[in-house]
Amino acid sequence: MQLDSSIIYILTKELKKELIYGQVRKIHQINNRTMVLEIFKPSSSPAKLIISSYNPPLIYINDENKNLNYTPAQNFCMSLRKHLEGSKITDIKQINLDRVIQINFSRIETAGEIKVKNLYIELIPSAPNIILTENNLILDACLKGNKKDRIISPKEKYILPGSQNRMDFTQFSKSELLDILTYNKNTSNALKELIFTLFNGFSELLLQEIFKNHSFMLTKESSTLNIKDIEFIVDVICNFKNTIKQVSAINLYNTSNQYLLSPLELNNSDKTPLKLSVNDAILYYLQNHKNNSNNISLSLQKEIHSLIKKEKRKLLKIEDELKETSKMNTYKLWGNLLAIHAYKKTPYEDFIILDNIFDAKQNKIKIPINKEKSLSSNSQLYFKKYNKMKTRIQIGKEKVENCKENIDALNHIYYYSTLITSNEELYALSKELETLGIKAKKNIEKKLFKNKTLNHNFLQFCIDGFKIFIGKNSKENEILTFKKSSSEDIWLHVKQIPGSHVIIKTEKQIVPIETLEKVASVAAFYSSGKDSGKITVDYTFIKNVKRIPNTKAGRVSYTNEKSILVIPHSPDFFIGKKT
């Protein structure tokens, strides 16, 4: 379940209503990426504000008094305690209708001075974070590091994530929106791309819903829009603005174990939604979705993530060692020259200057030596270094390839772990880890499904009359592609990142391009890039897909492929129900 900008807009209002002017009594951590702030208000019972920077990133209020299994405070939790305990919440706001919430805290400190600290909760699925600042400088962050466009580290200036060019459409009047769209419409982009470029707060699903019977306009080239078109678009946007400003309950859909929140009822779904506040919807999701297998899979995900980091550190170390071998040929040259001049006496300096007879111009060359040894012995030392580095290159290159293969395999397994919904699937994943020589930790292994018989339950849907099959792990991908499909079926996969194998059973019929685009969108959804916006999906006939020899299950090469650029969507976006 992901919180999009419009849902965060409503959630922010709920949080502000419940927590404004509350005092932070205590701060705990459930783990190093989930913080709990105990908030006290004289007019109401104490509340626990829980902020998680795991995926999906969440912020919600839990009023239950049950034990939350706190763990000993680590660095970031200690920083929050130092700066925020005893402070009052003075404001809660969403930044620019983006997926960032800012909470302002004030506290009387030394010499009676009132200091204001800001906590930024970045609810971006691909890069969630919690960042504490003062005067726009970072005090501490849950996840530190150098990103593409900013540095997250203490004393660095805080910069909001993502593009700051997009605007909050709720802040503009009807005439201002008309001017903005008229000024920016001279582009070859489709209308929906223009809206995504200009404004925060919209998703593909929401645009389809608010335009309803006029969805054809979304694909219309912006430059062809006339004044009546723009006026109609502005009316639609203003109606949506009024809706989310007045909404008191959102719609929670649960389809195929995927939870979806929407401020509007979805016409393309035959499911009856639950009407809840955003906070209650999050609690419902946590209570119903986070079953035992999900909790264990989270532990397994942590273990896999740790293994990926370990392999990456190992790879960097090997690559650094290989860089040292750049002197290999120099050592060989020095060894040869010293062997040729071995009859000479060792000089009293730490070097010797010789004619380089291997150089056409026979330039002088300065060679470092051990003056306590003969030139012959020095020559042998350089030959030993040369041979050692020659061996290091051979072994190092093999290790580099092995590390890269392991990182790739672990990234795939990490993605598959996000699809787990049962103990059977969890057990299958643990078996896949074993193929890499990795065994799940004992505390995880004990809880795994004890029935050793594995059934392959592929995800199955029907889109536009065509049966669609999706693998949920490497073994299922292997079986689905090479045992359950015929040569004329169509195979789809996201380009160059972990994802499921997706099969369209053609039954020797021609698949329309519109259907291909829908299934490609589903293939993008079942990949590690599902939260990345637009993504490229390759497709080809099964007969063009081949196993890569001597590699892990599910690794393939393919030819004669074509590519489609799509926005990821779950199957229910197209079909409304699972078949």
Image (spheres, rainbow, N blue to C red):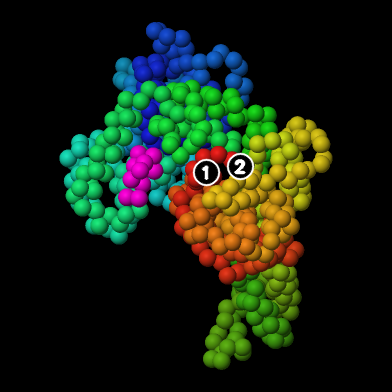
Image location (x, y in percent) of residue 56: 52, 36
The one of 53 and 557 positioned closer to us in this rendering: 557
Closer-to-camera residue (395/171): 171
Which residue is rendered at x = 41% and y = 11% of the image? 41
Residue drawn at the location 28% of the way across and 30% of the way down: 242
| Residue 211 is one of the magenta-drawn residues | yes
The secondary element bearing badge 1 is classed as helix
- Furthest residue toward top: 43
Whether the magenta-drawn stretch holds residue 230 is answered as no
Between residues 75 and 310, which one lies in front from this camera angle?
310
Residue 353 versus residue 34 in the image, above or below: below
**Residue type (three-letter) at the residue carrying disc 2:** Thr
Q: Where is residue 10 in the image (x, y as percent from the top left)?
A: 38, 28
Classified by dominant secondary structure, the portion drawn in magenta counts as: helix
Which label sits on residue 69?
Answer: none
In-image side of 106 versus 320 (left or right): left
Q: Note whether residue 311 is visible.
A: no
Residue 419 can be seen in this image = yes
For the residue carrying disc 2, how many other residues have a C-alpha within 10 Å: few (<14), some (14-19), or many (20+)? few
Instruction: Locate the C terminus by quadrant.
Output: top right
- Residue contact between numbered discs 2 and 1, judged by CB atoms under 8 Å: yes
Give the magenta part as a residue range.
Answer: 207-217
Instruction: Name the image quarter holding residue 246.
Output: top left
* Percent of width and height locating residue 37: 48, 21
Q: In this view, does 149 lie above or below 375?
A: above
Q: Say the numbered circle drawn on residue 575.
A: 1
Name the quadrant containing residue 320.
Answer: bottom right
Tag 2 residue:
579
Instruction: Report whether 149 appears left or right of 403.
Output: left
User: Residue 560's image quarter?
Assistant: bottom right
Distance from disc 2 to disc 1, alpha carbons, whole Å, reads: 9 Å
